[in-house]
Image (tube, rainbow, N blue to C red):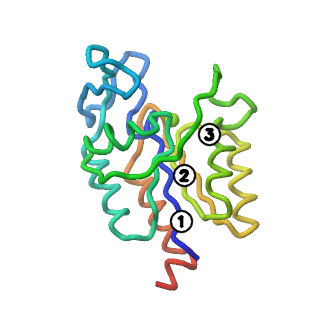
Amino acid sequence: MRPPYLLLDIDGVLIPFPDEHGSTPATHARHDVVPADRSADNPVTVWLNPDHGHLLMDIIRTGLVTPVWCTSWRQDATTLIGPLLGLPPLPHVDLPRPQITTSHPNGYLWKRDHVDAWLGDAPAVWIDDDFTGHDHAWAAERTARGAATLLVQPDPHRGLQSGHLTEVTRWVARLPSARAS
Ligand SMILES: [Mg+2]
């Protein structure tokens, strides 16, 4: 079996949402970035944890996963966010820009249909803060038909924790592809 994709969200995972007081975790440092669709005088402030770069690189270097951005940051994930964490240029799932007012317009994560088509029957671990029960059922169905699928869902106010990546490492190590190599 080929290595699973590691699909990575950004908002609510690498960039936690502020709490009710507008605070972000003390572990995160402020950066101002200019997405491709904005002008230089209209930057976006993001908060990133430098430790995430090290933690992600520890997994990426094993070669046991194929990392891919899966985020509404799209190409900006590769050009703006990744470098701030010391990550190499990673490909991204080319998500559309739907006119939606909720991230679950059909009761499940809006990205999922695109991801499902993009993955085909490839195994995948997908880290996103915004799955619903329908997404977890989708993952179970994929796994049952031979496309091993793990969803990892951080608390959007805390973001990615080292334990999430431990879970990923353990899951990957149990796959046939890892055992064969
Ligand atoms: Mg998110």
| Residue 28 percent location from the top left of the image | 27, 34
Q: Earlier in the sequence, mark 1 or mark 3?
A: 1
Q: In front of the other: label 3 or label 2? A: 3
| Residue 128 percent location from the top left of the image | 53, 43
| Residue 77 percent location from the top left of the image | 39, 40
Q: Which of marks 3 and 2 is nearer the N terminus?
A: 3
Q: Is mark 2 within 8 Å of ligand 1?
A: no
What residue is disc 3 on?
111
Q: Looking at the rendering, which quadrant does residue 96 occupy?
A: top right
**Could you give the CA–CA distance between mark 3 and mark 2, rounded to whole angstroms?**
11 Å
Please report contact status of discs 3 and 2: CB closer than 8 Å, yes or no: no
* Residue appearing at x 67%, y 39% in the figure: 132
* Residue appearing at x 32%, y 28% in the figure: 46
Q: Above or below — where is 63 with respect to 55?
A: below
Please report contact status of discs 1 and 3: CB closer than 8 Å, yes or no: no
The residue tagged with tag 1: helix, strand or loop?
A: loop
Give residue 4's mark.
1
Closest to the observer, 165 or 113: 113
